[in-house]
Image: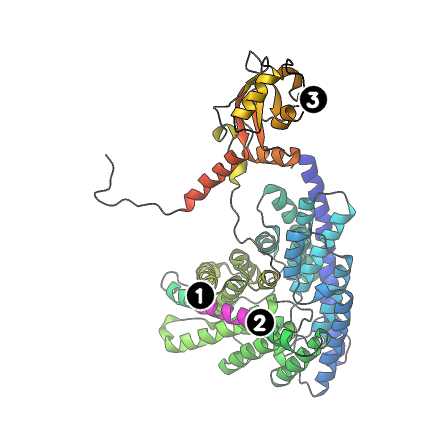
Amino acid sequence: MPPRRLLRLTLLSAVVGLAGGGAAYCLVHLIGLLTNLLLFQRSGWTIPSLRDFHPGPWLYLVTVGGAMIVAIFAKWAPVIKGHGLPEAMEAVLTKQSKVSPRTAIAKPLSSAVAIGSGGPFGAEGPIIVTGGAIGSLLGQLVHVSPNERKILLASGAAAGMAATFGSPLAAVILAIELLLFEFSTRAFIPLVVAAAVAGGVHSALFGSGPLFTPPHHDFTGLGQLPLFVLLGGLCGILAVIITKGLFITEHLYRKLPVSEFWHPAIGAIVFATVGLVVPRALGVGYDAIDDVLAGRLALGTLGALALAKLIAWWFALGSGTSGGTLAPILLISAAVGGTLGELASRMLPGAHLSPGAFALVAMAATFGAATRAPFASIVFVFELTRDYNAILPLMIATVIATLLATALMQDSIMTEKLTRRGLHVPSDYHVDLLATVRVDQVMTRDVVVLDSTLSVEEGVRRFHGGHHGAYPVVDADGRCVGILGRGDLLHGDLADDQTLGDVAAREIVAIKPGDTVAVALQTMVEEGVDHLPVLDADGALVGICTRGDILAARRSHLSVDRVQHGWRPGRLSA
């Protein structure tokens, strides 16, 4: 990308970052207002804690009423259903990153209503989608390419996450792992700028401290790592249970003999029932996560909270209402990790284990395994607590959990819906071979040419006797003076005594030996040709590059993934 375009894109991303930060501030306070009004019948802009929340049967009226409002929103903007990230990924992959203006309005409003009326969701998913929509809309307003619009969409999503949690590094990584499908300078710089600006907005409006209280722990290194390896394996299984359970719940809703319009109301009845038993399973749950990390909850309370939140979230999100995945998964996994940590500390009292540390590590491991974004989850949980001493167990447990979940589950929580729609989502990024290999490394050097002084009659005989569809025409010095196709001779009204130099096409589509194969392929596609003469600086023909040469280059690249024989005694060559 030219430097001037990159600078322009970076400035646009700064605007997106500022807008995403403002949107996060508005959404968080709107959720706080609605939660106070609907659940506590009072006014207030701060999201309240549910520690002392004691609901009664009236809770059904609130939750069902909120669900019906969300269902009406979904009639106007169907894209708001669910947590929204799969739809953002689909927009990037199939719609040139174009998001409807309705999404930027309907998603935050519907999510605020869903969460404010007791929905067991966090604000992060909706604000990530809202920020992405803002970036996409700006990319549709100004003159940019689809790839640049994709970067603006991802920058908006990163800005939303950074502004909500104060986690700019994780926001950048999450956007790369789930939305950009590339890692390049042209994408990285605007992403960082957007996340930095949004992170500054978070610091200015919400404060600069960690979102959650770091747990007290004494990690001593290798001696405790085996326990966190085991925890990672258990978190991988937990991620599969969480993800598969959601898929099954969504499938059950699709089998119901009622219109989709009523599904959110059914989900509201279920999670309200759960909320009557375990009130802290409702709402965003940030305060509950903090209590788990700080070790303020008893063993039985941890288990009940994990199960209640899981069931409430399954039936709420599976119903097609508007909500997120991040905070619920963090709370569920934290409660499970805290439970396992408490049990481990009782079984191994001399190991000085911290249930809060187990909860912290379980958050990163489970979220990373469920979303297939392990790097983002490691950095994210670190930024939430600023606890550098937890980095090693975070890393090992997260990669173990991701490895196990990948083996047991084909799709992640982000891609299953897209797979059902027939869309394949790439999971790995590779260096583009075609952009690193030169044409002179793959071209055909022994080129069959036609002399420009030959007659048309002789040219016709050459075409009849050969199997090529076109030939370069060269002069006495070996310079390419034109291209002659079979149709030019066999179907043209030409005199037999004309020379091939007279009738050959003078507009030569050619490339240079030092061009990359990617340039050759792009030229072939744009010009609609199957072969390109390769000319040196003097115009002399040094080879020809065909589609077959390009496929051969790709085939040789695939060979590096084939297993080769290792060295064994007796096989060492002389």
Q: Is residue 52 visible?
A: no
Identity of the amino acid at label 2? Leu
At 52% from the left and 51% from the top, the residue drawn is: 428
User: Cβ–Cβ below 8 Å for labels 2 and 1?
Assistant: no
Judged by depth in the image, the label closer to the viewer, 2 or 1, is 2
Q: Is residue 76 visible?
A: yes
* Distance in Å between CA atoms under marks 2 and 1: 21 Å
Rendered image: mark on residue 493:
3
Q: Nearer the viewer, residue 170 or 493?
A: 493
Residue 477 higher or lower than 260, as above or below: above
Total tally of numbered discs in the picture: 3
At 57% from the left and 69% from the top, the residue drawn is: 329
**Secondary-structure class at tag 1:** helix
* Distance in Å between CA atoms under marks 3 and 2: 69 Å
Judged by depth in the image, the label closer to the viewer, 3 or 1, is 3
Q: Quadrant of the C terminus?
A: top left
Judged from this view, the residue extending furthest toward the left is 570
